[in-house]
Image (spheres, grey):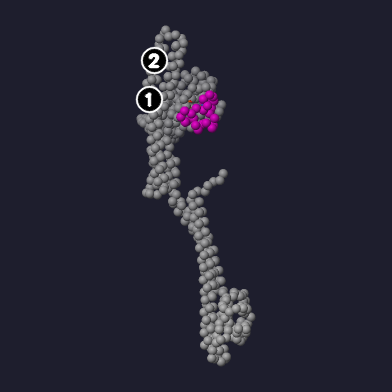
């Protein structure tokens, strides 16, 4: 599987790549331009020297050869690289200077035709450029050759290259850092939106995302998420209202069915088959009424309208009470029920709900433990915590299903134990634990047994 790089890293890479490409293109253009203008500059200098040389030739028209010699020598000395100057007649014979210096400078051969050309030569390991220009002076053709070093140009270009190459890593690091910093800054609101969305669940759908800077794309995203949350909240509220209303509406017909069955069963002359039918109707209506009550409890919990009045409760007392109520059911299945609870373990709680929570755990232990098994209820306290454990030697719960048993209507393969139930008991138990700020956990091994632990934060001072 390929892992996608984060948007910040991808933006940084793009930013750096585009910056590098731009910088290289800029460098190449500048390099070509610089080389061309240095080249032109050198050519212009050579041309100017050739023109000045021509002026000297013209001015020396009526001079003796000695005077000419002195004039050209002065001219040569007055120009940089002045000794790289050469005058030839039409046949290619040098008439100035008589003693060329440097002696072995590689003057390029004259071109076949008149005009002007630049030729690059190398002398003593250094590059030179020579201008060959044909001029007609006093009716005679003369070749003027002037040479100049190219070292300065080359040096300037190589310094420019070194500067460019040295700047690349520095600019690359600077562009990557600034690109990363800018993209992180730009995407920070996305992180905030993500963590705010993560913290929203069905229980706190009324929360909304912060909508900070006005007008940008992220503000629109946050606004759209808020609109979606509002629609979800509305939809969930309607479902909750429907469940609550439906459960409520079903209550009356169910109690009517129950009342009629009970009334009919009180008749001693009821034929046996009719009695059997009424008994079945009564049992079903009692079960359906229980299910309805559970659904109403959860609907009220969803609506946040349970409005339970909390008081200081002695957990030991509640546990002993529930165990006493459940004992006949355990005895009926030949299950050993052991209770270990010392007085103490006070919590802020709602008595009826806590009874309901412990009843669910103990009733499940009875339901899912085969005859002859053992059930243990234990209350232990430690500083800051009171903990009730209900353990059984029952059929256990497959590990993969354990996280799901607290979901509504979830039953871990109902066919396993042929046990009656609705799958709402533990969902309600968890809700009760939540409103008491307690945690409800399960440890279970198939065919060995289960252990449900409710850990309450103890009242301060215990
Ligand atoms: P139910 O009405 O089915 O008992 P609960 O919500 O109380 O619904 O429990 C959900 C499921 O968790 C049960 O159907 C059962 O599969 C499993 N379960 C709960 N308690 C135990 C237990 N003590 N031993 C084995 N399985 C259990």
Identify which residue is drawn at 38% across, 16% down.
Answer: 259
Identify which residue is drawn at 47% across, 31% down.
Answer: 407
Tell me the element at label 2. helix
Identify which residue is drawn at 60% across, 78% down.
Answer: 113
The part of the chain drawn in magenta is 392-416
Residue 167 appears at what percent x and percent y? 52, 63
449 or 300: nearer the viewer? 300
Q: Is residue 41 above or below residue 190?
A: below
> Going by the picture, which residue comes out furthest to the right?
104
Q: On the rendered image, what quadrant is the N terminus found in?
A: top right
Identify which residue is drawn at 44% across, 8% down.
Answer: 271
Judge left or right: residue 237 versus residue 389: left
Q: On the rendered image, what quadrant is the C terminus found in?
A: top left
Q: Quadrant of residue 360?
A: top left
46 or 221: nearer the viewer? 46
Magenta span has 414?
Answer: yes
Residue 285 appears at what percent x and percent y? 42, 19
Q: Is residue 377 above or below residue 77?
A: above
> To which residue does mark 1 refer?
248
53 or 186: nearer the viewer? 53
> Going by the picture, which residue comes out furthest to the top?
269
Q: CA distance from mark 1 to mark 2?
A: 19 Å
269 or 87: nearer the viewer? 87
Magenta span has 22?
Answer: no
Of the numbered discs in the image, which one, if any, rests on residue 260?
A: 2
Per the picture, the main secondary structure of the magenta-coloured stretch is loop
Mark 1 vs mark 2: which is more N-terminal? 1
Tell me the element at label 1. helix
Residue 333 appears at what percent x and percent y? 51, 19
Q: Residues within 10 Å of mark 1 (few under 14, many from 20)?
A: some
> Is residue 292 among what the camera can see?
yes
Q: Residues within 10 Å of mark 2 (few under 14, many from 20)?
A: some
């Amino acid at each position: 599987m390929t892992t996608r790089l984060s948007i910040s890293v991808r933006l940084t890479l793009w930013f750096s790549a585009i910056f590098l490409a731009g910088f290289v293109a800029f460098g190449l253009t500048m390099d070509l331009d610089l080389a061309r203008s240095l080249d032109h500059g050198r050519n212009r200098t050579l041309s100017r020297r050739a023109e000045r040389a021509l002026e000297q030739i013209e001015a020396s028209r009526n001079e003796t050869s000695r005077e000419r010699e002195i004039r050209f020598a002065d001219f040569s000395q007055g120009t940089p690289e002045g000794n790289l100057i050469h005058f030839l007649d039409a046949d290619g014979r040098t008439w100035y200077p008589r003693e060329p210096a440097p002696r072995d400078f590689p003057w390029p051969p004259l071109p076949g035709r008149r005009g002007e050309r630049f030729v690059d030569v190398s002398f003593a390991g250094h590059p030179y450029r020579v201008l060959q220009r044909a001029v007609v002076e006093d009716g005679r053709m003369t070749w003027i050759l002037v040479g100049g070093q190219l070292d300065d140009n080359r040096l300037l270009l190589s310094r420019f290259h070194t500067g460019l190459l040295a700047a690349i890593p520095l600019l690359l690091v600077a562009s990557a850092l600034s690109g990363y910093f800018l993209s992180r800054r730009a995407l920070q609101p996305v992180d905030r939106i993500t963590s705010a969305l993560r913290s929203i669940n069905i229980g706190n759908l009324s929360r909304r995302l912060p909508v900070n800077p006005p007008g940008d794309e992220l503000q629109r995203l946050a606004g759209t998420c808020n609109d979606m949350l509002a629609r979800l909240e509305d939809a969930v509220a309607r479902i909750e209202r429907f469940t609550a209303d439906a459960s409520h509406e079903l209550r009356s017909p169910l109690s009517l069915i129950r009342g009629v069955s009970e009334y009919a069963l009180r008749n001693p002359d009821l034929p046996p088959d009719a009695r059997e039918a009424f008994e079945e109707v009564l049992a079903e209506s009692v079960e359906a009424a229980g299910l309805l009550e559970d659904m109403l409890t959860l609907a009220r919990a969803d609506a946040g309208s349970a409005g339970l009045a909390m008081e200081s409760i002695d957990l030991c007392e509640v546990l002993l009470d529930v165990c006493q109520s459940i004992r006949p059911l355990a005895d009926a299945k030949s299950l050993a029920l052991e209770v270990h609870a010392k007085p103490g373990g006070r919590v802020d709680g709602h008595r009826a709900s806590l009874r309901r929570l412990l009843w669910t755990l103990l009733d499940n232990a009875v339901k899912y433990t085969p005859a002859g098994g053992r059930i243990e209820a234990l209350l232990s306290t430690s500083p800051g915590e009171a903990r009730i454990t209900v353990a059984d030697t029952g059929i256990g719960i497959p590990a993969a299903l354990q996280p799901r048993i607290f979901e509504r209507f979830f039953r871990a393969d109902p066919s396993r134990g042929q046990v009656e139930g609705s799958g709402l008991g533990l969902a309600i138990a968890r809700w009760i634990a939540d409103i008491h700020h307690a945690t409800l956990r399960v440890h279970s091994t198939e065919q060995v047994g289960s252990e449900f632990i409710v850990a309450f934060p103890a009242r301060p001072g215990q």
